Amino acid sequence: MYIVCSDRKTISIGLNKTGEVVIRIPYYLKKSELNQILNSNKKYVEKLTKKGELIKNNKKYFKENEEFFYLGKTYKLKIVENQTEELIFDNAFFLSKNFINKSREIFRKWYANETYSIVMKKVDYYSKKFSLKYSKIKVSNSNVSWGSCNFSKVINFSWRLSMLPEEIIEYVVVHELVHLKELNHSKNFWKLVETMLPNYRTYRNWLKNNNHLFLNLF
C-alpha cells in the first residue's frame, strides 16, 4: 500500500497499473484522520488488495501453454520450431522459437494490428451512421486507458483492445466517438452514448468489473 501526499483537497483510494493500492491524501491530513478513513473503508481496501493480487499475477512470461486473451477468450501459447513467421494465430498462438527473445514486441505488434483492423470497421460504421467526423484514428501503447479523444479529434485506442469481447470493443469505440461532440462525461454525453448503443450500461459494468484482467500483462 502506498500513501501519496499532495496539495489536493480530496481523498482517493485506488489501484495503480501494477496492482498496488494507492491512497492519495492532502498534506494537511492528520495520521489519526487517515487511520479513521482506512478503518471506515476497510472492506473496500481489502477488495482492492485482492484485485491487486490478480493484477500482479497477470504478467506473461511467454512460456508454453500460457494463456492469452483474444476477443474475450483465452488461447494457449505454443512455442514451435521450423516456423518462418514470427507469430501465427489459429485457435492458439504459435510463436516461432527463433523469435522468442522478441516475444513482447511481437505480441504487442500483433494485438495492435488486430485492434486497428477491428476498430476501423466499427468506427467507419458508427461515424457514418451518426455523422461524426474525426481527424485520425491511432493505436497507442497505453496500458492504462482503453481510449482517448482530444480537441483535434484524434482518437487513440489502446493496443490491448483486441483482447476484449467484441461487444465491449464496440462500447469503447462508441464512447470515444461521442467525445467528438462532448469532451466530458455529462448527462448529455451519456444520452448520446445510449442513442448509439442502448445496452451500453451492461458493457460499461463489464469493463469496470473485468478491467483488472487486462492490466500489467507485458
Image: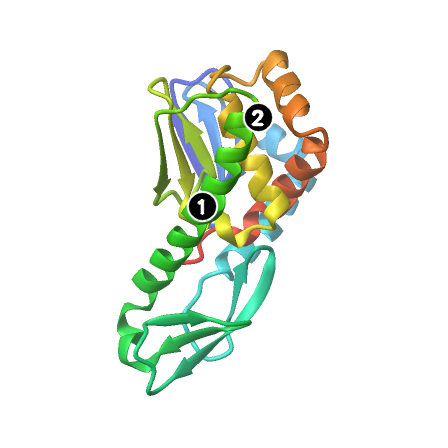
Between disc 2 and disc 1, whose residue precedes? Answer: 1
The three-letter amino acid code for the residue at tag 1 is: Lys
The answer to whether residue 11 of the structure is visible from this angle is: no
Relative vertical location of residue 43 with respect to residue 71 in this rendering, above or below: above
The three-letter amino acid code for the residue at tag 2 is: Lys
Q: Determine whether, in the image, residue 52 is placed left or right of residue 101.
A: right
The label number, if any, that marks residue 91 in the structure image: none
Relative vertical location of residue 141 with respect to residue 101 in this rendering, above or below: above
The label number, if any, that marks residue 17 in the structure image: 1
> Residue at position x 46%, y 19% from top?
180
Q: How many marks?
A: 2
- Closer to us: 59 or 201: 201
**Residue 210 in the image, given as x and y percentages of width and height:** 62, 48
Say which of marks 2 and 1 sits in front. 2
Q: Determine whether, in the image, residue 33 is placed left or right of residue 61.
A: right
The residue that disc 2 covers is: 129
Question: Which of the image's four quarters has the C terminus?
Answer: bottom left
- Closer to us: 46 or 93: 93
- Closer to us: 30 or 69: 69
Relative vertical location of residue 64 with respect to residue 11 in this rendering, above or below: below
**Residue 15 in the image, given as x and y percentages of width and height:** 51, 41
> Residue at position x 69%, y 41% from top?
43
> Residue at position x 58%, y 17% from top?
189
